[in-house]
Image (tube, rainbow, N blue to C red):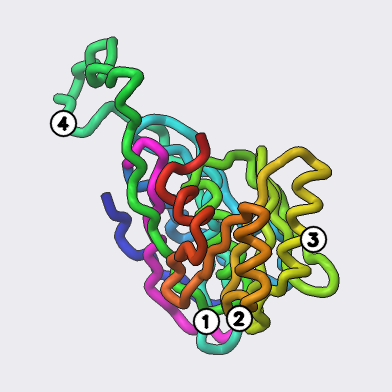
């Protein structure tokens, strides 16, 4: 499933672009593409807030609503353009003859309880800015199985905290490697809230941070510029393999 590109004109420099939104994987395995509204006026982003960075889109295959990154386009003049999204009605499954109603009932034979549904592969997003690092981390949390992703909050002296149901994540989108103290702080926060914790870093971790994370069983991930988080310790290997149980 793809959506053809739509013309987008920058209101700042009047330059015209062809934009096609990316596809994201629903939990059912089907691709979800934010339906960009053709002909709608785009607006330059002047105030960045985490709530504005996400948009609710229904999966046309299973009907689930999901939170996905708000479509945006970087113009050559330096403006970041927010592109409006609509929501087409959920229609009958592809291939249903006109005038026919698809039969009511299960679309497939349920799998046994002992056979877990395999997760679709994580779809990376290219990292160009610090905001992209936070977006990738939030999408990866969802892919691991965490739900109700909260707002991103900057924490002193550095790093960004993102919470979800049952977890708190520390994200370092700068070129500073995370330290043992960073790992200890997010672990203490998680213990106080009786939740799990994990870390994402663009620049990796100091040796002491690796040792402390192993002793505390804190998963560590590195996000490369392709937007693919990679586990760098054994707790992260296990979490990536099993997801949230």
Q: Which residue is mark 2?
A: 79
Q: Is residue 80 left or right of residue 224?
A: right
Distance Cα–Cα, label 1 vs label 3: 39 Å
Query: Which label was assigned to residue 67?
Result: none
Asked if disc 2 and disc 3 are in contact, CB closer than 8 Å, the reply is: no
Mark 4, secondary structure of its residue: loop
* Magenta extent: 12-29
Mark earlier in primary sequence (1, 3): 1
Dominant SS type (magenta): loop
Counting other residues with Cα less than 10 Å from the Cα at mark 2, is it few (<14), some (14-19), or many (20 or more)?
Answer: some
* Mark in the foreground, 4 or 3: 3
Distance Cα–Cα, label 4 vs label 3: 54 Å
Distance Cα–Cα, label 2 vs label 3: 37 Å
Mark earlier in primary sequence (4, 3): 4
Mark 2, secondary structure of its residue: loop
Distance Cα–Cα, label 1 vs label 4: 39 Å
Q: Which residue is mark 1?
A: 75
Task: Identify the image quadrant of residue 47.
Answer: bottom right
* Mark in the foreground, 1 or 3: 3
- Asked whether 245 or 28 is in front, the reply is 245
Mark 3, secondary structure of its residue: helix
Can residue 44 be seen by looking at this rendering?
no
Distance Cα–Cα, label 2 vs label 1: 5 Å
Mark 1, secondary structure of its residue: loop
Counting other residues with Cα less than 10 Å from the Cα at mark 1, is it few (<14), some (14-19), or many (20 or more)?
Answer: some
């Amino acid at each position: 499933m793809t959506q053809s590109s739509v013309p987008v004109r920058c209101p700042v420099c009047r330059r015209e672009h062809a934009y096609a939104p990316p596809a994201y994987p629903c939990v059912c395995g089907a691709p979800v593409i934010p339906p960009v509204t053709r002909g709608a006026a785009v607006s330059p982003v002047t105030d960045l807030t985490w709530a504005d960075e996400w948009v609710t889109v229904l999966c046309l295959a299973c009907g689930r609503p999901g939170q996905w990154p708000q479509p945006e386009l970087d113009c050559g003049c330096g403006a970041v353009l927010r592109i409006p999204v609509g929501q087409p009605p959920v229609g009958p499954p592809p291939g249903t003859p006109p005038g026919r109603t698809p039969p009511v009932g299960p679309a497939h034979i349920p799998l046994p309880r002992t056979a877990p549904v395999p997760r679709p592969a994580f779809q990376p997003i290219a990292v160009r800015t610090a905001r992209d690092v936070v977006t990738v981390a939030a999408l990866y949390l969802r892919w691991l199985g965490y739900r109700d992703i909260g707002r991103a909050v900057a924490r002193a002296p550095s790093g960004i905290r993102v919470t979800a149901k049952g977890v708190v994540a520390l994200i370092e989108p700068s070129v500073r490697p995370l330290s043992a103290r960073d790992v200890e702080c997010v672990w203490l926060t998680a213990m106080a809230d009786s939740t799990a914790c994990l870390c994402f870093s663009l620049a990796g971790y100091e040796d002491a941070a690796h040792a402390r994370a192993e002793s505390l069983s804190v998963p560590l991930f590195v996000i490369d510029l392709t937007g693919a988080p990679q586990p760098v310790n054994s707790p992260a290997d296990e979490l990536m393999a099993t997801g949230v149980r």
